[in-house]
Amino acid sequence: MKKILGPMRKAIEDFNLIDDGDKIGVGVSGGKDSMLLLYALKLYQRFSPEKFELEAFTVDLGFEGFETKAIESYCESIGVPFNLKKTNIKNIVFDTRKEKNPCSLCANMRRGAIHNSLKDRGFNKLALGHHGDDAIDTFFLSLLYEGRINTLPPLTYLDRKKIYIIRPLLYVSEQDIKNSIEKNNIPIVNNPCPADKKTKREDMNKLVHKIYKEVPDARNRILTALNNEKGLRLWFS
Ligand SMILES: Nc1ncnc2c1ncn2[C@@H]1O[C@H](COP(=O)(O)OP(=O)(O)OP(=O)(O)O)[C@@H](O)[C@H]1O
């Protein structure tokens, strides 16, 4: 877990992600990123200078075959309280509204549900499993499809909901997450969404990997650029 805990601790320190007395809810989809984040934060809790509470929050979107029991058992095995919010988001998005591009409405509704679950439990921070490679994919998606320079921020405050969103794994690579999942026998729960792995994000990930083949060390330089305020030079002041 060194390759996870080291960079995660650095991100927590660099971006001041955790304060004493925080109540942190981890958004757990059952996928590798959030399952690993949950385990890593549980380990970090032991030696963190800031004392914080930790619980898992899962939103069941209503797809058949979503094994929430497996997430619950894993949480129990590592001693993290588990919260489940059942919703009918799948019915609204796919059956009632028959959305052609379901991902954005679904993600919006999922965010709403998870923020409300946290608020109901009196939690003030939501930790998400996004890692460095997600930040790079988001950067290129925004640049090439939206014409803006943007990526996933480590810390955001949602004024309307009065909760902070934190992303402690932004210094961690997807490959290191995959390796840790295997080494630590962390179970993964299958995502039954029909749009999973068929998104623009997946296409962007393939494009980015083509760049890595052409330009040695491009990945590290892109990550450096995302955090290089002094190197920012655009057309406005
Ligand atoms: N159903 C859900 N319930 C709770 N949190 C969720 C849910 N779906 C996603 N999240 C949170 O939002 C983050 C980003 O979601 P996204 O759908 O992009 O998943 P991902 O990048 O495949 O990550 P993961 O491997 O954790 O599924 C996840 O890492 C997790 O923290």
Image (cartoon, rainbow, N blue to C red):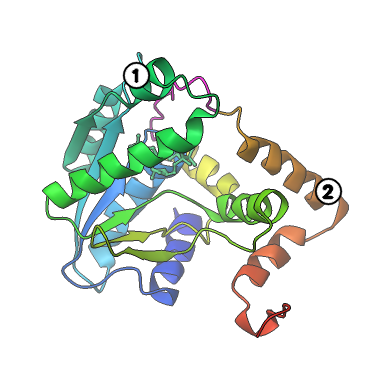
Is residue 14 toward the left or the right of residue 225 in the image?
Answer: left
Residue 2 marker: none
Residue 105 vertical placement versus 171 (above, below): above
Quadrant of the rendered image containing residue 45: bottom left
Residue tagged by mark 2? 213
Q: Residue at x 40, y 67 (%)?
A: 9
Compared to residue 92, the image places residue 209 above or below, namely below
Residue 212 x, y percent position in the rendering = 79, 51
In this view, the residue farthest toward the front is 97
Q: Amino acid at mark 2?
A: Lys
Circle 1 Cα neighbour tier, 10 Å, few/some/many (<14 / 14–19 / ≥20)? some
Residue 217 screen position, x and y as percent: 77, 61
Q: Check disc 2 and report its element: helix, strand or loop.
A: helix
Ligand 1 is found in which quarter of the picture?
A: top left
Magenta region, residue range:
186-196
Which is more N-terminal, label 1 or label 2?
A: 1
Residue 131 position, x and y percent, is 51, 52
- Structural crowding at the residue carrying mark 2, measured as other residues with C-alpha within 10 Å and reported as few (<14), some (14–19) or many (≥20): few
Report x, y in % for residue 226.
62, 68
Residue annotated with mark 1: 91
Asked whether, in this view, residue 181 is left or right of residue 229, the answer is left
Instruction: Say whether residue 172 is visible.
Output: yes
Q: Residue 185, can we see it? A: no
- What's the distance in space between the residues labelled 2 and 1, CA to CA? 41 Å
